[in-house]
Image: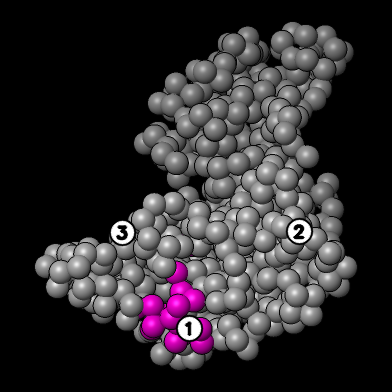
Amino acid sequence: MQYTRKVIDHYTNPRNVGKIADANGVGEVGNPVCGDIMKIYLKIEDNIIKDVKFKTFGCGAAIATSSVSTEMIKGKTVEEALKLTNKQVVDELDGLPPVKIHCSLLAEEAIKEAIVDYYVRSGKTEEEARKMCGLKPKGCEHCHHEQDETEE
Amino acid sequence: MKVRYFDNAATTKVDERVFEAMKPFLTSEFGNPSSIYSIGRETKKKVEDARETVAKCINAQPKEIYFTSCGSESDNTAVKGIAYANRQKGNHIITSKIEHPAILNTCKQLEKEGFEVSYINVDKNGIIDLNELERNIKDTTILITVMFANNEIGTIEPIKEIGQIAKKHNIIFHTDAVQAVGSIKIDVEDLGIDALSMSAHKFHGPKGVGALYVKSNVKFNKIIDGGHQERNKRAGTENVAGIVGLAKALEIANNDIEKNAKYLKELRDYYIKSIEEKIKFVKLNGDREKRLPSNANFSFRFIEGESLLLNLDLKGICASSGSACTSGTLDPSHVLLAIGLKHEIAHGSLRVSFGIDNTKEDVDYLIDSLVEIINRLREMSPLYEDFVEGRYELDEM
């Protein structure tokens, strides 16, 4: 498997690893059975993402996409962060091997889940918040085991 | 950076003496063994000498050895060849759940062709359930194929006992011994083996050459059609250099087998002991005693294998993992699942397979690197955070 220089750089020296004690938006996606979990912590003030940290259980691509996407949303408004797509994440890394594209989806969704949590803490209902973030009701959409129909 | 190689179950470096033995057959001694003139006859003689060497190393007859292109071809020829040739007797094959894909996928193909295959369970250490194996035998059973030693977890199967069961029921017994040949003494007569696969590059021989032993009274069909090479059982101009290399490598490995096993076991047991002392929440996969001298396979909780391998690679360390992300499929290794590991534990596995070129200093470097990398990956792991903060129960592994 060939990773780009940028992917290697990010899994070698991941940015923004850790947790934020007083985070006001936390999102976690993935599942240990699939082999990847991504957790994003946000500190949002005046609608601006002041700080962001992540923790990831997963492969090199999962770590790199977490790392680069935290860089991409830091200092942005909540609305800007919601516009982040997995394609932008992949482009920022100069590409990912096809079998690793789901990792970039994970990053996009983890950020959205963290913003849902922020909206809920700000008084929105879960349903409203998910709608505002363009998310379906909670599920494991990227999980391999639901995609793979040949799975026993 | 110095490369430290701990993946000898994947492949090994060609021994210098083997390379020297092969060289003439890649240059001056290029004759086709099927040709009638002198340089053809000479290479033919070398192929036959190699056959004799291989036969001697496993206590077989030279006429029972067939050269192939690799371990997978040996497995395909044994399983398909025996199945096709014995179809009038029955269509049932017994194998295990932890075989190499060369056996499992061959069996799956035969199922599509109307054969019936029973896949026998293994215990938590990877040892086949002999009672279940015997219970599955029926009138139509024509072949039992069980690996000698597992490539991922290193578990050595009870080959002699399987040979006895096969003999009692008059069934042909094949073993994929690709991981065992050259590191465990094998006597096919004593063990009751009817067919056995091997591959040169696993014991410091070249890639692209394997061998298959089939006992003289066992019928099998040829799989590669063409000329009359290998007593009309495997067509194709002989890979003379490869065959000479295989025989030379096996001869060297067999001569040094006890010395090498002792050395590798020392490295392996030192590594296992150190990891268990220095890193928490680990599980050794495979049997502690019935284990290849070179193999150590650990699951490290809360981390994923591919990121572990990438970090090891940055330190010049070559090893292997059973995680889904390294297998090219979406599931972790079938072997780790068959021994009962949960998916998330299987994802965090690391196989190291030592070689005679490794030193204790190499192993120390590996251990120190693992301690550092695993700590770092755990600090980055949300599963570990959940565990530390009491949201994740550590269940039985």
Between circles 2 and 3, the one closer to the viewer is 2
Dot 2, crowdedness within 10 Å: few (<14), some or many (≥20)? some
Mark sitting earlier along the chain (2/3): 2
Left or right: B178 in relation to B1: right
Question: Based on the displayed image, in which of its 4 quarters is residue B260 positioned?
Answer: bottom left
Dot 3, crowdedness within 10 Å: few (<14), some or many (≥20)? some
Q: Is residue B372 visible?
A: no
| Same-chain status of marks 2 and 3 | yes
Residue A82 covered by magenta stretch: no
| Rendered position, A80 above or below B216 | above
The reply to whether dot 3 and dot 1 touch (C-beta < 8 Å) is no
| Residue at mark 1 to residue at mark 2: CA–CA distance | 28 Å
| Rendered position, A24 above or below B192 | above
Residue identified by numbered label 2:
B90
Provide the chain ID for the residue under circle 1.
B
Mark sitting earlier along the chain (1/2): 1
Residue B64 covered by magenta stretch: yes
Q: Quadrant of the C terminus of chain B?
A: bottom right
Left or right: B98 in relation to B226: right
Magenta extent:
B50-71
* Residue in the foreground of this view, choosing between B378 and B154: B154
| Rendered position, B261 above or below B336 | below
Whole-percent x, y for residue B327 in the image: 57, 47
Residue identified by numbered label 1:
B61
- Residue type at the position of mark 3: Thr
